[in-house]
Image: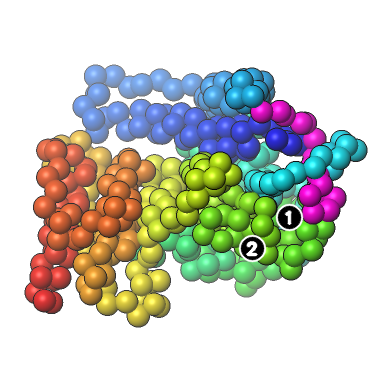
């Protein structure tokens, strides 16, 4: 294996794991401030100042990210019997990889290079210093005011962390709502929750210019400007296959676009080149990359299997969380599917009522013609766990009418599945 940066990729050190550590610390601080509504009213709680709290959270983040040291991951990898080469690998020609000025011949090549930050072509941005998520999750600094371009998962998680530790946060999203790739109803519910919490969100806007003098200034036109101490770009990721000189495979592949693969994750147009993870454009998540690793390994060992991407879950770990699988209502409508939706608020579950912690809802989408669950979205407590039930149902091909007979433990948030499933099952039975 040739690795230029860290063994294990960015998730353990610069993304998923430090993000979840900081989100958890921010959630505990936020929940503690709501102590009166949970019955702790004997005396006022005394909080340290935001900077001290943030410093303490950062120290936990560093431990979770193993202090940006991948020696443990390297040792585990080497125990498997594989060889690790530190450096950038490039394709010299079909069958030959170049790394550290040494040539290595291959019978099979696996590309798992990940992606890089997408920096949008905004006027003035070239002259402005800005952070990416990697900078945020490796810095000890918490700006007083932070401007975030991008209302997707990365930008929103950072927004809530910064806000709950005392920063003023402005999120700018050019689409009509945050999380534009997700179900609009669910995205708008989260958007309102974050606004009510105190995060400033601007949607459906165009950025005309960005200036930096003492502060960073974003011009949204119509004499509307947003000023902050630090700018953070969270506008997604993109491929950059030029870095590995993909052109030397003599394939018609655009460097910034997803690399095309077949059902077995073999790069189209080749007989011995495989690709997995973010660079395929299938679903940019660590669990997708892990799954692709298993598929490619099996195929390399001669046990030919095809990848099944029909039920890959998606997650956003703000408080409340958002999780989904399958397609959104907007996509179902665009595909002219004979569908129906049903939803249930968590506040109307016994668990939500008892704990007074039931924001959000579960939304299901059924294909009425095929009796199949084709989409599920959750915004609410432990959404990343709750979505697993829908993932299993879709992966296993369980019908809506069979799913509706499932019994859920009482009192749990997962009981929210029962009313919408029964509603959809009734529509399917009446259709017949």
Provide the residue span drawn in magenta: 82-97
**Residue at image coords 44%, 22%:** 47
**Residue at image coords 23%, 74%:** 369
Magenta residue check for 288: no
Considering depth in this image, is 94 or 244 the residue closer to the camera?
94
Compared across the picture, whether 295 is left or right of 254 comes to: left
Rendered image coloring scheme: rainbow
Q: Secondary structure at mark 2?
A: loop
Compared across the picture, whether 216 is left or right of 25 comes to: right
Magenta residue check for 95: yes
Give the residue at mark 2. Answer: 268
Q: Which mark is residue 52?
A: none
Q: Give the image location of residue 384, x and y in percent.
A: 36, 43
Q: Quadrant of the C terminus?
A: bottom left
Residue 209, quarter of picture: bottom right
Considering depth in this image, is 367 or 31 the residue closer to the camera?
367
Q: Give the image location of residue 30, x and y in percent.
A: 40, 33
Q: Looking at the image, do the residues carrying marks 2 and 1 touch, with CB atoms under 8 Å apart? A: no
Give the residue at mark 1. Answer: 240
Compared across the picture, whether 293 is left or right of 432 comes to: right
**Residue at image coords 17%, 46%:** 415
Q: Is residue 91 above or below residue 86?
A: below
Residue 45, quarter of picture: top left
Badge 2: few (under 14), some or many (20 or more) residues near its Cα, within 10 Å?
some
* Marks 2 and 1, the one that precedes in the sequence: 1
Query: Of tags 2 and 1, which is closer to the observer?
Result: 2
Distance from the alpha carbon under mark 2 to that under mark 1:
18 Å
Residue extending farthest front: 302
**Residue at image coords 57%, 54%:** 265
Q: Secondary structure at mark 1?
A: loop
Q: Give the image location of residue 75, x and y in percent.
A: 64, 20
Residue extending farthest bottom: 336
């Amino acid at each position: 294996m040739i690795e230029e940066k860290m063994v294990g990729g960015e998730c353990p050190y610069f993304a998923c794991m430090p993000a979840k550590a900081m989100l958890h610390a921010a959630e505990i601080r936020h929940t503690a401030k709501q102590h009166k509504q949970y019955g702790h009213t004997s005396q006022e709680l005394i909080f340290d100042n935001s900077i001290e709290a943030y410093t303490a959270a950062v120290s936990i983040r560093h431990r979770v990210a193993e202090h940006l040291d991948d020696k443990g991951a390297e040792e585990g990898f080497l125990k498997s019997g594989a060889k690790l080469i530190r450096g950038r690998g490039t394709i010299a020609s079909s069958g030959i990889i170049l790394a550290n000025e040494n040539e290595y011949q291959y019978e099979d090549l696996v590309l798992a290079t990940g992606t890089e930050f997408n920096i949008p072509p905004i006027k003035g941005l070239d002259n402005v210093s800005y952070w990416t998520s990697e900078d945020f999750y490796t810095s000890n600094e918490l700006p007083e005011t932070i401007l975030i371009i991008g209302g997707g998962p990365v930008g929103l998680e950072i927004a809530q962390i910064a806000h709950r530790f005392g920063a003023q946060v402005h999120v700018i999203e050019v689409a009509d709502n945050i999380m534009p790739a997700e179900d609009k109803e669910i995205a708008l519910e989260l958007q309102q929750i974050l606004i009510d919490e105190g995060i400033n969100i601007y949607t459906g806007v165009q950025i005309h210019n960005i200036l930096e003098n003492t502060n960073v200034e974003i011009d949204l036109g119509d004499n509307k400007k947003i000023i902050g101490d630090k700018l953070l770009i969270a506008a997604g990721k993109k491929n950059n296959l030029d870095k590995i000189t993909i052109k030397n495979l003599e394939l018609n592949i655009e460097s910034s676009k997803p690399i095309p693969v077949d059902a077995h994750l073999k790069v189209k147009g080749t007989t011995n080149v495989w690709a997995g993870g973010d660079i395929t454009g299938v679903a940019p998540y660590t669990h997708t990359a892990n799954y692709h690793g298993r598929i490619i390994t099996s195929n390399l060992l001669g046990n030919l299997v095809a990848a099944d991407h029909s039920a890959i879950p998606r997650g956003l770990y703000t408080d409340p969380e958002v999780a989904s699988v399958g397609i959104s209502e907007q996509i179902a409508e665009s595909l002219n599917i004979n569908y129906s939706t049903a939803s249930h608020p968590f506040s109307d579950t016994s668990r939500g009522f008892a704990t007074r912690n039931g924001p959000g809802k579960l939304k299901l989408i059924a294909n009425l013609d095929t009796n199949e669950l084709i989409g599920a979205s959750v915004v609410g407590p432990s959404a990343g766990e709750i979505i697993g039930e829908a993932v299993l149902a879709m992966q296993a091909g369980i019908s809506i009418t069979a799913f509706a007979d499932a019994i859920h433990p009482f009192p749990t948030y997962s009981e929210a599945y029962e009313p919408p499933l029964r509603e959809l099952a009734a529509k399917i039975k009446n259709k017949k």
